[in-house]
């Protein structure tokens, strides 16, 4: 079982991901904006973060940059799950240290497999 933080402001996606991840025996925390995501990551240090790019308060790319700049949080695997499909968005996220990049709409089972693979590599 892993602790996974879902950082997304789309409640429907959050609930679908929560359901799928909890069914796979993971503990799930939710942040509906970028600031809450950073606060949760700092307080609870999740095993993995699923991060949306277009978040209120602080954007996903800024959250990613702050996570990777923090020595205590930089090694947490991050899956960017976003509607942003542009080449520049994908390349910028990969250069910033994101571990996986999936675009919405997405295949839930594919996301789960990618999460499991990242968790296996991190342990």
Image (cartoon, helix red, strand yellow):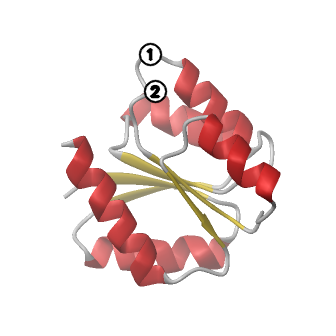
Q: Say which of 2 and 121 sits in front.
A: 121
Q: Is residue 54 visible?
A: no
Residue at 36% x, 62% y is: 115
Which image quadrant: the C terminus?
A: top left
Q: Which quarter of the picture shows residue 20?
A: bottom left
Q: Is residue 58 left or right of residue 104?
A: right
Dot 1 falls on a residue whose secondary structure is loop
x then y, percent, for residue 112: 37, 72
x then y, percent, for residue 107: 51, 83
Q: Which quarter of the picture shows residue 94?
A: top right
Residue at 52% x, 76% y is: 15
Assess disc 2: are there few (<14), some (14-19) or many (≥20) residues with their C-alpha within 10 Å of its C-alpha. Answer: some
x then y, percent, for residue 118: 32, 53
x then y, percent, for residue 14: 56, 70
Asked whether the residues under the numbered discs 2 and 1 touch, taking CB atoms below 8 Å apart as contact, a structural biologist would say yes
Residue at 37% x, 34% y is: 45
Q: Say which of 21 and 11 sits in front.
A: 21
Compared with residue 110, is residue 37 higher up or lower down, i.e. above or below? above
Q: Say which of 59 and 109 sits in front.
A: 109
Dot 2 falls on a residue whose secondary structure is loop
Q: Is residue 5 left or right of residue 34?
A: left
Compared with residue 72, is residue 21 higher up or lower down, i.e. above or below? below
Q: Is residue 62 visible?
A: yes
Residue located beneath label 1 in the image: 71
Compared with residue 91, is residue 108 higher up or lower down, i.e. above or below? below
Q: Which mark is residue 74?
A: 2
Residue at 27% x, 63% y is: 26
Q: Say which of 35 and 93 sits in front.
A: 93
Q: Which mark is residue 34?
A: none
């Amino acid at each position: 079982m892993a602790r996974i933080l879902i950082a997304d402001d789309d409640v429907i996606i959050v609930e679908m991901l929560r359901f799928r991840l909890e069914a796979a025996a993971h503990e799930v925390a939710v942040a509906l904006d970028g600031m809450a995501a950073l606060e949760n990551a700092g307080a609870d240090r999740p095993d993995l973060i699923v991060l949306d790019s277009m978040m209120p308060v602080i954007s996903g790319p800024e959250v990613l940059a702050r996570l990777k700049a923090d020595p205590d949080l930089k090694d947490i695997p991050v899956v960017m799950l976003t509607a942003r499909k542009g080449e520049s968005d994908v390349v910028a996220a990969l250069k910033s240290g994101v571990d996986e990049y999936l675009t919405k709409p997405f295949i839930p089972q594919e996301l789960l497999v990618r999460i499991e693979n990242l968790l296996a590599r991190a342990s």
